[in-house]
Image (cartoon, coloured by chain):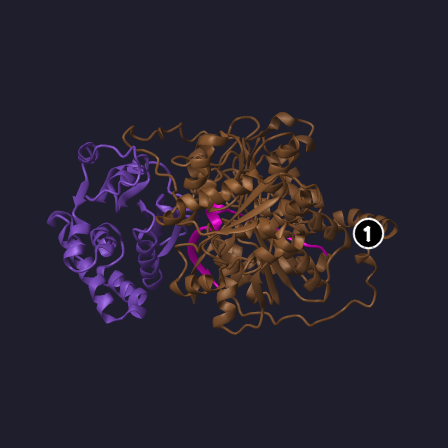
Chain colours: A purple, B brown
C-alpha cells in the first residue's frame, strides 16, 4: 500500500524542509519513497508544492493520481484548496489558519475556512501562532509534521530522529525547538485519530 | 547503501562515478542542480574536476568537446532551450565525432513550468543522428550515465541524455556503484576528422551515415529497452522514459499488454515490429512531442494502428500524468480538475527590496511620456516585469534577444528603443548584439540590470563579474554614454533624469543599473558592493 501526501504552501514556508524530514525517515526505516517538487521561481512568493509517496513496495509514478492523496498538508489555507482535486474522499485536509495575502485578489478568509470545513476529515490549526509562542514562527512546518505523523506509516521516533539529523548542524537548541514543535503537533490531532504505535 | 537524491543529483553522481574530468554548463531550470551538485562535491571531496559555470551553452559544449578531444570524459548540462544556443557545435561534433566520452544532458520542461516553450530534445538528437538515452527513474538516471559514456566512446559520438522536469526534480533512493578512474590525457595521432573543411566533412558525414546501423544495433541490444510479452494482443504499448511509470502505476507488475519500455533511441525496429505484428493497436506514451508516434506512423503500412497524441488519445500539449495515461488506456474517465473559484493564482513575484523593482518604477514613469511598446525585455527574474503590477517590458523571446530587437525596431523607426537585459544574460548572448548596434550607430538605449548574479536559477556567479563597463567601452560605446545608476527608491528622480538623457542621445548608450540581488549572502553582497562602479 502506498501513502500519498501533498505538501503545499508559499515559497519560503519550509515545505521542502518538511519533505526532507519525511524522505530521511523513509530511508532510515526501510520505506521506499518518491518526492517530487515544483520549484524554480517559487522562492519569489509563488505557490510551492511537493508530492510525497511512501510505500514498502515499488512506487512507479512520481506524481500522485487525482483523488489519490491520503492527506494534503498546507502551511497556508488557500494553497491547501489548490490541490483539493487530489484528495481521496476519506482523505485529510490539514492546514495552518494563517494566510499569506501577497496578492491583490486574495479571497475572503472566512469563505476559505468554510469550504475546508465542508470536508469531513479536516484540521485547521493555529500552527504559526503556537510556533511563535515557542520562539520562532518559521517552525510551524514542524507542528504540521507532528500532525501528519499520525497519518503516515512512519513512527514518531523515526521522524524525530530524522529531525535531529537534519538540524544537528544548527545546534542543540534548534534541534530541541523543532522536536518541541513536532510534539505540539501530535497533541493537535483528536485522540481517536492518534496512532497507538510511537 | 542507498542515498536520497534528486533525479538531477543522480545524474551528477553517475557522471562523477563514470570518471568525468569536467562538467561544463549554463544554469537553467530544470537542469541547474546537476552542475551545482558536481561543483559542491568537487570542493568537499577534492575530486580535482574542472567544474565551473560557462558563459553560455555553446561555449560549454565546445569546451567539453575540447576536453573530449584531449582524451577525457566530459559532461555538459543545460535546459532544453540551451541546446538551441549550442546547436551549431552539437550538429558538427556529431560529424567530427569525439574522443573521450561526451554526454550532453538536456532537461526538457513539458508544461513550461519555468520556460518559454516545451520543445522536445529527442528531435535534435535525431536531427544530429546521435543516440538519446531517456531514463525513467532516479536509479536509471544514475546507471544510465555510465552506460551513456561507454556508448559515446564505443560509437565515438556525443550522446544526448534527456531528462524531463518530473524526473529532474523528484527525489528517491538510489544505490551508487564504485567509481571508475578518470581517463588519461591523450591527443590523437591523426586529427583529420576534426578538420571539417568540405572535403573532410563529406568523408565524415558519410561515416556518420554508415554508423547509423551500428547505433540502431546498440538500441536493439540496450538493457534500457525492454520488451515485455503480454497475455493480450488487443493493444501494444510503447512507453518512453517516465511515461513508463505512469503506465505501471495502474498495473503494478501485472500489465496484460505487450509493452516496449523505451529508454534508448533510435527506436529499436525489431522490437517494434514484434508489437506491430502481434497487436491490434499500438499506443505510444511519451513525454513531450509525438516523436515516436510520428516515426511509427511512417514506419508501418497501417498508420491507423498507431494511437497517441496525434490521434487525441492523449494531450497534444503539456506533460503527461497517471490520470491522462489511464484515460488513454480506457480504464478511467476524465476527472474534474477545476479549482474552487475561491482559489486564485499566486504567481512568482520580485522579492521585496529587489533592484529590478526600482528600475521598473523609473521606466514606468518614463513610459507615461514616451508611450507603450518601446521596451524590449530578456530572460531572467526581470522577465516578471512583463506581468502586473509592472507591465514594463513588451517582449520576451530568448536569451539576448532584447538588444538586437531594440536595434531592428530602431532601424524601422521606433524612437526611443530601449532594451532591458540582466548582467548574466548580457554576457551569455548580449555582447554580439551590442557590437551590431555600435557598428551601425543604432539609436538604442540598453539598460543592463546588474544584480551580480544569475539570480533566477539560485544566485550562481555571473560571468560578467566586474567586466561590464570595460566590455561596453571595448566594443566602442562612447565613454560619455556608458552610465551607471543605483536603483534605489532614494535615487528615483535622479535615475529618471539619467535614463531620459540617454534616450535623447541618438546613438548607442548603455546604462548599467547596478545593485546586488537581495537573495545573495551577506558576504557576496559585500563583495558585489566593493566591485560596483557606484
Chain to which mark 1 belongs: B
Apparent side of residue B189 relative to residue B90 in the rendered image (left or right): right
> Among all residues in the image, which is located at the extreme left?
A191
Kindly indicate the quadrant of the structure image that contains residue B418. Answer: top right
Main SS of the magenta part reads: strand
Q: Local crowd at mark 1 within 10 Å, few (<14), some, or many (≥20)?
A: many
| Residue B171 is inside the magenta segment | yes
| Residue B49 is inside the magenta segment | no
Query: Does residue B306 sit above or below B185 in this rendering?
Result: above
The residue labelled by disc 1 is B204
Query: Does residue B181 sit above or below B113 in this rendering?
Result: below
Apparent side of residue A161 relative to residue B49 in the rendered image (left or right): left
Q: Nearer the viewer, residue B192 or B383?
A: B383
Q: How many marks?
A: 1
Query: Does residue B72 sit above or below B402 in this rendering?
Result: below
Image point (38%, 36%), residue name: B389
Apparent side of residue B285 relative to residue B384 in the rendered image (left or right): right
Amino acid at each position: 500500500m502506498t501513502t500519498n501526501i501533498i505538501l503545499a504552501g508559499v515559497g519560503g514556508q519550509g515545505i521542502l524542509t518538511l519533505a526532507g524530514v519525511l524522505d530521511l525517515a523513509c530511508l532510515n526505516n526501510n520505506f521506499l519513497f518518491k518526492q517530487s517538487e515544483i520549484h524554480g521561481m517559487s522562492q519569489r512568493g509563488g505557490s510551492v508544492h511537493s508530492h510525497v509517496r511512501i510505500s514498502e513496495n515499488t512506487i512507479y509514478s512520481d506524481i500522485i493520481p487525482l483523488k489519490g492523496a491520503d492527506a494534503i498538508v498546507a502551511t497556508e489555507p488557500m494553497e491547501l484548496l489548490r490541490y483539493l482535486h487530489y484528495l481521496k474522499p476519506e482523505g485529510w485536509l490539514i492546514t495552518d489558519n494563517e494566510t499569506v495575502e501577497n496578492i491583490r485578489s486574495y479571497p475572503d478568509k472566512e469563505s476559505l475556512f468554510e469550504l475546508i470545513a465542508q470536508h469531513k476529515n479536516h484540521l485547521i490549526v493555529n500552527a504559526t501562532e503556537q510556533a511563535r509562542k515557542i520562539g520562532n514562527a518559521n517552525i510551524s512546518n514542524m507542528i504540521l509534521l507532528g500532525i501528519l505523523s499520525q497519518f503516515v506509516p512512519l513512527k514518531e521516533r523515526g521522524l524525530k530522529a530524522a529531525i535531529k539529523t537534519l538540524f544537528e548542524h544548527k545546534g542543540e537548541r534548534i534541534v530541541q525547538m523543532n522536536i518541541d514543535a513536532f510534539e505540539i503537533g501530535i497533541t493537535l490531532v483528536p485522540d481517536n485519530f492518534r496512532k497507538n504505535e510511537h | 547503501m542507498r542515498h536520497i537524491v534528486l533525479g538531477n543529483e543522480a545524474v551528477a553522481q553517475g557522471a562523477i562515478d563514470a570518471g568525468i574530468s569536467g562538467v561544463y554548463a549554463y544554469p537553467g531550470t530544470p537542469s541547474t542542480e546537476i552542475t551545482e551538485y558536481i561543483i559542491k562535491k568537487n570542493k568537499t571531496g577534492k575530486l580535482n574536476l574542472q567544474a565551473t559555470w560557462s558563459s553560455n551553452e555553446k561555449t560549454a559544449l565546445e569546451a567539453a568537446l575540447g576536453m573530449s578531444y584531449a582524451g577525457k570524459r566530459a559532461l555538459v548540462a543545460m535546459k532544453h532551450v540551451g541546446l538551441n544556443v549550442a546547436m551549431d557545435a552539437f550538429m558538427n561534433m556529431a560529424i567530427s565525432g569525439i574522443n573521450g566520452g561526451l554526454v550532453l544532458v538536456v532537461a526538457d520542461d513539458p508544461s513550461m513550468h519555468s520556460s518559454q516553450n516545451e520543445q522536445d530534445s529527442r528531435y535534435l538528437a535525431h536531427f544530429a543522428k546521435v543516440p538519446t538515452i531517456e531514463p525513467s527513474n532516479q536509479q536509471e538516471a544514475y546507471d544510465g550515465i555510465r552506460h551513456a559514456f561507454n556508448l559515446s566512446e564505443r560509437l565515438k559520438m556525443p550522446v544526448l541524455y534527456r531528462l524531463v522536469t518530473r524526473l529532474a526534480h523528484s527525489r528517491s533512493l538510489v544505490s551508487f556503484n564504485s567509481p571508475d578512474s578518470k581517463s588519461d590525457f591523450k591527443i590523437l595521432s591523426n586529427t583529420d576528422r576534426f578538420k571539417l573543411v568540405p572535403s573532410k566533412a563529406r568523408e565524415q558525414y558519410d561515416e556518420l551515415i554508415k554508423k547509423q546501423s551500428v547505433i540502431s544495433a546498440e538500441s536493439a541490444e540496450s538493457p534500457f529497452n525492454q520488451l515485455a510479452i503480454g497475455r493480450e494482443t488487443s493493444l501494444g504499448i510503447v512507453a518512453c522514459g517516465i511515461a513508463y511509470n505512469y503506465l505501471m502505476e495502474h498495473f503494478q507488475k501485472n500489465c496484460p499488454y505487450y509493452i516496449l519500455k523505451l529508454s534508448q533511441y533510435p527506436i529499436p525496429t525489431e522490437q517494434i515490429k514484434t508489437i506491430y505484428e502481434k497487436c491490434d493497436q499500438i499506443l505510444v506514451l511519451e513525454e513531450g512531442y509525438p516523436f515516436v508516434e510520428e516515426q511509427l506512423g511512417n514506419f508501418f503500412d497501417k498508420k491507423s494502428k498507431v494511437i497517441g497524441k496525434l490521434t487525441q488519445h492523449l494531450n497534444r500539449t503539456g506533460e503527461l500524468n497517471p490520470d491522462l495515461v489511464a484515460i488513454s488506456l480506457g480504464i478511467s474517465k476524465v476527472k474534474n480538475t477545476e479549482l474552487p473559484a475561491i482559489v486564485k493564482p499566486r504567481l512568482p513575484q520580485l522579492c521585496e527590496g529587489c533592484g529590478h523593482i526600482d528600475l521598473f518604477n523609473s521606466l514606468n514613469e518614463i513610459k507615461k511620456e514616451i508611450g507603450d511598446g518601446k521596451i524590449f525585455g530578456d530572460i531572467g527574474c526581470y522577465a516578471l516585469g512583463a506581468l502586473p503590477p509592472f507591465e514594463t517590458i513588451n517582449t520576451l523571446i530568448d536569451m539576448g534577444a532584447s538588444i538586437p530587437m531594440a536595434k531592428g525596431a530602431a532601424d524601422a523607426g521606433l524612437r526611443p528603443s530601449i532594451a532591458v537585459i540582466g548582467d548574466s544574460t548580457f554576457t551569455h548572448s548580449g555582447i554580439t548584439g551590442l557590437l551590431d548596434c555600435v557598428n551601425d550607430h543604432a539609436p538604442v538605449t540598453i539598460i543592463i540590470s546588474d544584480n551580480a548574479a544569475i539570480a533566477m536559477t539560485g544566485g550562481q556567479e555571473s560571468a560578467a563579474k566586474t567586466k561590464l563597463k570595460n566590455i561596453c567601452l571595448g566594443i566602442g560605446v562612447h565613454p560619455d554614454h556608458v552610465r551607471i545608476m543605483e536603483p534605489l527608491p532614494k535615487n528615483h528622480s535622479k535615475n529618471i533624469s539619467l535614463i531620459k538623457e540617454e534616450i535623447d542621445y541618438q546613438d548607442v548608450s548603455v546604462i548599467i543599473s547596478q545593485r546586488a540581488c537581495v537573495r545573495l549572502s551577506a558576504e557576496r553582497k559585500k563583495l558585489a558592493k566593493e566591485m560596483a562602479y557606484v
